[in-house]
Image (cartoon, grey):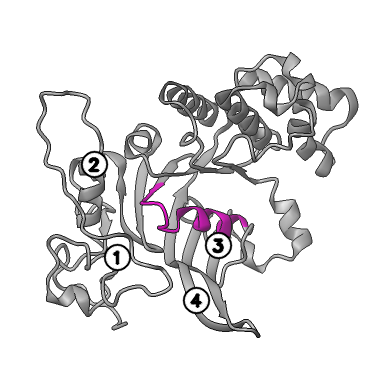
Amino acid sequence: MIGQENGNLLEVRGLKKYFPIRRGVFSRVSGHVRAVDGVDLALRRGETLGLVGESGSGKTTTGRCILRLLEPTEGSVVFDGVNLLGLSPKEMRKMRRELQVIFQDPYSSLNPRMRVGSIVGEPLIIHKIAKGSEREHRVADLLCKVGLDPSAMKRYPHEFSGGQRQRIGIARALALRPKLIICDEPVSALDVSVQAQVVNLLMDLQEEFSLTYLFIAHDLSVVEHISDRVAVMYLGKIVEVAEAEVLYRNPQHPYTKALLSAVPVPDPTAKSERIALKGDLPSPAAPPPGCAFHPRCPVAVEVCSRVVPRLLDSGGGHLASCHLVHPDSSGAPP
């Protein structure tokens, strides 16, 4: 089975998600927004893969398509040897015990009318795992593991701070003992000091429960701290993948170099060259021909505007899709 033979827990191949653009009185489809446009990803068991990129690059949509919170337009998602896109709604519901998500906003992701005990314990009821005193005991234990007092069970989400609410969301994600958790910018809405606490908590829980993370974020300093490997996404495509240490030390794609140059340096005496990109992220409804990054790329050459570069290995599993990195790279004309 795929994903079991090679040690990968999750394999995503050719994943696409196009949203129709409707116009006129009869809502005719006049085009599509290519939010995710052919993503290939693999997650090894027990690792954290960071997925980074600007807002609008398709990171969150990719995560939601993997979970089938959004139905992909095309592609395959193989989790633990099972193609999730081939499952019926009933089969997918059972599989959700193995896949969970931590959402970006720790307040809107929690039902304000439910007490914390009910929020964290609801998955146990839905999947008929525990009820009554056993469920309360499990919920109390989960709250302790995320750094909250069991007395929080009787309180409502609005009575907690942002960091505490995110801990509640983490406890809910852990309730079913999943194998994979997709963390959708879980610390971007929190204060910097609280961000470090939550990231460290996630790392401790990963070790304790043997979890695999897909960590979606735009803050590269946070991603560097938690990730084993990093994938860089631009306009619905993966443009570079490498071990975290390698990518931060030797980025190959010009877009990755620009992102890393914007990371604040803690040493005020250190000099770093800031790479300023021209223009804004292109519309995914009308992506540019050739390499999608070429209109903003400071080192683009003529071939970049004509030919789509392939994601090729530079050695040691360091993948990059750039004609300057791989001069022999060829792709299908747009």
Residue, disc 1: 311
What distance separates the C-alpha of mark 1 from that of mark 2?
24 Å
User: Would residue 45 be seen by someone viewing this image from the given angle?
Assistant: yes
Alpha carbons under labels 2 and 3: distance apart: 33 Å
| Mark 4 vs mark 1, CA separation in Å | 24 Å
Which residue corresponds to mark 3? 77
> Residue 237's quadrant in the figure?
bottom left
- Does 231 appear above or below 152? below
Mark 4 highlights which residue?
A: 32
Numbered circle sitting on residue 262: 2
- First in residue order: circle 2 vs circle 3: 3
* Mark whose residue sits in front, 1 or 2: 2
Farthest residue toward the right? 132
Q: Earlier in the sequence, mark 4 or mark 1?
A: 4
Q: Closest to the observer: 203 or 24?
A: 24
Q: Quadrant of residue 253?
A: bottom left
Quarter of the rendering containing residue 38: bottom left
Measure the C-alpha gap from mark 4 to mark 2. Answer: 32 Å
User: In this orientation, does residue 253 appear?
Assistant: no
Range of the magenta residues?
51-67
Residue kind at label 1, given as amino acid type: Leu
Task: Answer with left or right where residue 239 lies relative to residue 236.
Answer: left
Direction from residue 75 to residue 269 in the image, left or right: left
Query: Sequence-wise, which precedes: disc 4 or disc 2?
Result: 4
